[in-house]
Image (cartoon, rainbow, N blue to C red):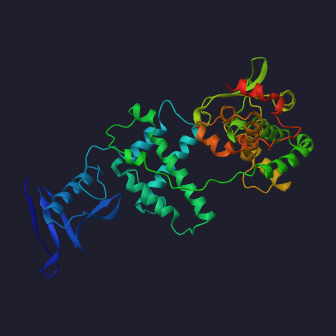
Amino acid sequence: MKLTISDYHRKDGTPDPNRRRVTRGDLTVTLLKRGRFWETRIMLAGERHHLNLRTGCLKTAARTAIDKARAALGEQWDFVHRGRTQRGLIKLGEICERYLGQLAPRAAATTIVRNVPRFKSLVRIGLGLKRGKCVDHLPASILDGDLVKQFQVAYVKGYPEGEAAEARKRGANGMLADARSLFTKGIMADELYPDMPDISKFILARHLPAVPVAFRYEAIEEWVEKLFANLPQLKLDDPAVYLYFRLCAVLGLRRREALEARKGWVTTRRGHRVIYIQPTDGWIPKGRRERKVPLPEDLYNDILLLSDSSEFIVPIATRNANHKTNHGVSRRLNLWMTGLGWPFKKKAHELRRWFGAQVATQTGSLFAAQRLLGHASPATTNQYYADLVDAPEYKITTETANVPPSKAEYITNISC
């Protein structure tokens, strides 16, 4: 069909020099000249949008505007903010829907649910859209390196150099990592998303350089000793919090791992009692790393004495109806630690780091620390504990520590 470009007449009948009317078949659109470029107006989800056609050529703008309008009529918003419309590309909404419905999840269930809104937030921030604005209709072709750069600039804007800016950079890097988890090698290899354009620049975009948070081992040790001194009273007052504390501090479990820990995980390996961290229905350990951690005899006896009749080690009394979360125990632990003067922002996770410091100092092996902590990448272990391996003069000697120096060889063997 022939493309016709005609003048746009005002109400008084005079032609408007900055507007043109474009017709092809039964479809008519209006072009508006703003500065050097032509624009067009299209209704999207009940809202009027101005689309910058990114060209000063009238004929090119007319063809592009017709393509975009025809795609809008068919509810196929397969266009990018610059350039021509590309049909047949998968939408962001379809990507999120397929990611949430994948048959073989490759991360913890809560992580999967969290990654989708963080992915959409990255897109909104990168495009300068308002909070809560729907982006499901946008095509996957917007996922490129430029989008990441625009997001990073907007996310840290207004934060002066210093700790606030560094924290903001780490937040941007975390959001980018969560957004890219929708496009892991396994998911892409399974062809979960049909008609996916080349988004390699989005996947390979660099993180912002941020200074890692220093972990003060000596200060943590002093406060953990104070916590251990108050454990007998906690054991009497709140057995669930007591068990939760010991799973984090004595076994180095993550917060969610401690709450998901089952009695059926207790087993033996090479003649020693261990707890086997493994996937369950609807939950997979972070990093997808199964591991066996030595279980001290006194903690094993506490589990037998203080646990309830459920399958979980931490009593289930405060869990929700689906038995999937136990936030009440976590909250009470935070209140208990704060009441004793705990000065650090994190609670249970700092106990896990303290355990990692013990393993690194008393075995001298980053490999043992990585295996016992369940880090997916050795780079994570190296970031926090490499300096302890090179500093043998620093030793943790707390009597209640799970990893006394005499067991260093045992830990190294059991983690292999």
Q: Residue furthest top?
A: 271
| Total marks in image | 0
Reply above or below: 260 against 87. above
Decide if residue 10 is on the left or right side of residue 399: left
**Image location of residue 86, percent across then percent down:** 25, 49
Image quarter where the C terminus lies is top right
Q: Please identify the residue farthest to the left as the structure is shown.
A: 2
Front-most of residues 340 and 367: 367
229 on left or right of 124: right
Position in image of residue 129 (x %, y %)? 43, 62
Q: Give the residue at the far bottom of this rendering.
A: 12
61 or 132: nearer the viewer: 61
Front residue of 368 and 109: 368
**Residue 5 in picture, x, y percent from top left:** 10, 65
Quick one: 364 or 112, which is closer to the camera? 364
Coordinates of residue 157 in the picture (x, y in percent):
51, 67
Position above or below: 95 against 207: above
- Residue at the (69%, 43%) spot, across then down: 385
The image quarter in which residue 383 lies: top right
Examine the rendering and report whether any part of residue 259 can be seen.
yes
Left or right, 54 with respect to 198, comes to left
Q: Quadrant of residue 397?
A: top right
Residue, x 31% and y 58% (percent of image)? 81
| Residue 397 relative to residue 80: left or right | right
Give the image quarter of residue 62. Answer: bottom left
Question: From where the camera sits, is residue 325 visible?
Answer: no
